[in-house]
Image (cartoon, grey):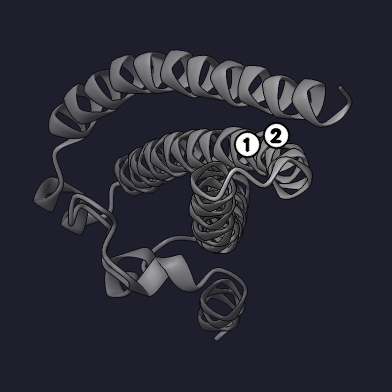
Amino acid sequence: MRKLLITIILLVTFPALVHPGFFGNSVDLDDLAQLSQKGLEDLKDTEFEVFLAQVRLAGAKDDLKKANGELKAVKKILSSEKSDLKATEAEVKAAKEIQDKERLTRAESALQKSQEDYTSAELNVAWKAQEVKARKASVEKAELELNIAEIQRDLARVAQLVSEKVPAAQKYSAENLEKSLKKKQKTLTKAKRDEEREMWEAKKSKEDYEGKIKE
């Protein structure tokens, strides 16, 4: 009865127990129910790491959603600035055609301002577009970190089943899990480098934009 209670607590606290991992290697809850009280308690750390990885992934996805929203907004501003630029160009042309010097002076001044605003808007879009790329890289990294946490969780589950000589342990392949873990860890190393590069590019794009608007 006590083992069942602990299993229920783990189920409520760590929903990942009853959901297959990214690779479908998650150990069945029925098999985990055969473990001792101590065995179940020993699994809490790896279960919690999966929970933390899920939270980090959710946060990364939320950041990406916000970045996409900001990119959409600045693209609208760029479109508006482009329309204004075309209008001021047309005004300069019209002033030249009628040889109205006063009107031409005003139009050229407005054109210069419009060109500056358009350039700033372009740089803003470039920054936000790079920010989206950086956030996508963060999501990819977070997904890999969740993959790895799930595999490490499953390895801990299988090890505990083997340690307590639970017959169901033979259903699972620790060797295959180890292979998947090594592969994902190698991929994660690259993903971290990609994220760092994209973040650096986003920082540079932001500096370019802020430097322009300060001129």
Residue at disc 2, secondary structure: helix
User: Which residue carries the number 1 mark?
Assistant: 115
Mark 1 vs 2: CB contact within 8 A: yes
Q: Residue at x 12, y 47 (%)?
A: 170
- The number of numbered badges drawn on the structure is 2
Q: Which x, y percent locates residue 58?
A: 55, 60
Q: Quadrant of residue 182?
A: top left
Which mark is drawn over residue 94?
Answer: none
Camera sees residue 200: yes
Where 132 falls versus 74 (above or below)? above
Task: Assess disc 1: are there few (<14), some (14-19) or many (≥20) residues with their C-alpha within 10 Å of its C-alpha.
Answer: some
Give the farthest residue toward the right.
214
Badge 1 amino acid: Gln
Badge 2 amino acid: Gln
Q: Which x, y percent locates residue 184?
A: 29, 26
Where 196 falls versus 154 (above or below)? above
Residue at disc 1, secondary structure: helix
Where 4 falls versus 99 (above or below)? below
Camera sees residue 43: no
Q: Residue at x 51, y 77 (%)?
A: 11
Q: Which x, y percent locates residue 65?
A: 53, 62
- Rounded to the nearest angstrom, the CA distance separating label 1 from label 2 is 5 Å
User: Which residue carries the number 2 mark?
Assistant: 112
